[in-house]
Image: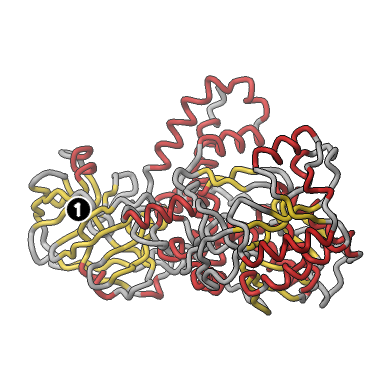
Amino acid sequence: MDENIEKILLKYALLNAKKFGKASEDAVIKKVFQERPDLKKEVKSILPLVRDVVERVNLMSSEDIERKIEEMGIEELKREEKVEILPPLIGAEEGKVVMRLAPFPSGPLHIGNARMVILNEYYIRRYKGKLILFFDDTIGSEEKPIDPQAYDLIKDGLEWLGVKYDEVYYKSDRLEIYYEYARKLIEVDKAYVCTCSKEEIRENRRIGVECSCRSRKPKENLILFEKMLKGEFREGEAVVRLKTDMKHPNPAFRDRVLLRISEREHPRVGKRYKVWPMLEFSWAIDDHLIGVTHILRGKELVIEDMMEEFIWDIFGWSKPKFIHYGLLKLDEEGAKLSKSKSRKMIQEGSLKGWDDPRTWSLQSLRKRGIQPQAIRNFILNLGLSEADITVPIEILYAENRKLIDGIANRYFAVLNPVRISLDKSVEKIKIKYHPDHPERGEREIPLDKDEIYVEREDFEKFKGKEVALIGAFTVLLGERSNVLRQEVPYEVPKIHWVSRPFLKIKIIMPNGKEIDGIGEKGLEKLNEGDIVQFYRIGFCRLDNKKDLVFYFSHK
């Protein structure tokens, strides 16, 4: 095999680790094959070497990676950064575009909802249009009820993202409007009150047969509708259906429900109303009345498109344009947690609240130190496509790392400490807050006692060997460690450490696990909200200054 292969592998592993914090075997192999396509036929013999190189690089600190890149004379992979500009909106005119955000307030916005928000806002900025926040707070369901806190949580999430909207509407304020248009549809014989059982109508829709209710005259249907509004029918006894083609090729489009009865209490209007619109009916009315020009939604909502267009045609209204995008899945365990499941876990006490990192809400991401601009960059870089995509969460973290790496100072913390005695001749050392930003100055770490603490894993791995204490000196590691030299050679393994006096800290991980540890005394100078980088641990945000509780961001 070509003797330069290892050098090529090392180059791409170093660059990949610098960009993402950790090198990936797949990414390294792809880059190598781009440079040396002839090696594809030798993939089996190359894989063990790839694993070895990636493993070695992932044990290096970011400073070592930078130093090695410089030492090897590796040039950064320079390419023209192609700014991902979303396609133009069909028929859009500057100053005339109106779009809406339509959250259902079952909980706060989460990372998945952010795509809907940011794509809409992108186009409003681009066309200098109007953005409307429209709470889709119809009655919901037993499985997916409205959370009264969600209204403020959603507004809070939008404010944090920097999203500005021009108007706010609530569907729960507009029930009389929906009733008015339901009456109009009944009057022109395009809708009817159906009193069939669910099983009966389900079977009729399956085989394409009209029920007897469909033949009632508009006047009779209007009387029945008023009885629904007065509460003379119980839940499940009557619904209003739209008259479509019962032979339509899509059974789901046959005589769909427009309004139904619900006796549940609504957090904003109580039990004042018992008849509630279905999503597609309310949107057909509201999108016309508020002047929406473009509707951006997931491609799975095609039936809603069909319903809106059908109703617009009945009234002779102009039609907004539809833009669809595919499903976004995050390749991260826990990021699939639903709002309904999160709510249940909060009620049971197994989650601390909507800002618990396991909810993946915007509030939880803020608590972890994820920056709004990182989320915006992450979403826009994905583009606008109808293809379903699964994206590694590491891509979001890479965007965030670009923003916080330059602002986060470095500190020492040890999570599984082992005490060792130190044979030393100095009482304090000075270490830069950030190796790439000397202008930030240095922090002073006291060594007024002859003991320090290192990670148990490092102690067991390097006991009896020469190691460097980062920023300090080189020692022969043991229960009693002798200082061998003041300088820190490049080739010597480096470990982080904490000296006395230390502070007790707690780090809360994305999976909710709480890890106790100790950190250097300088942490007491931090303020809540500060983001730090703990050597070999990762980026963390200080949430509670009194108890030194940090939330883990990412590596």
Res. 276 in view: yes
| Residue 123 as seen in the image, left or right of residue 549 | right
Question: Residue shown at 40%/38% (left/top)?
Answer: 56
Outermost residue to the right: 316
* Quadrant occupied by the N terminus: top right
Question: Residue shown at 67%/79% (left/top)?
Answer: 167
Q: Type of residue at label 1?
A: Arg
Q: Where does the image place residue 170, in percent across and percent down from the top left?
A: 63, 72
Q: Where does the image place residue 112, in percent across and percent down from the top left?
A: 57, 54
Q: Mark 1 points at which residue?
A: 485
When asked about the image quadrant of residue 122, the answer is bottom right
- Above/below status of 58 relative to 152: above
Q: Nearer the viewer, residue 366 or 432?
A: 366
| Residue 265 as seen in the image, left or right of residue 275 | left
Question: Residue shown at 61%/51% (left/top)?
Answer: 236
Q: Is mark 1 on a helix, strand or loop?
A: strand
Q: Where does the image place residue 279, in percent across and percent down from the top left?
A: 68, 58
Q: How many marks?
A: 1
| Residue 242 as seen in the image, left or right of residue 272 | right
Question: Residue shown at 45%/31% (left/top)?
Answer: 51
- Above/below status of 240 relative to 286: above
Q: Residues within 10 Å of mark 1 (few under 14, many from 20)?
A: few
Q: Where does the image place residue 468, in percent across and percent down from the top left?
A: 25, 50
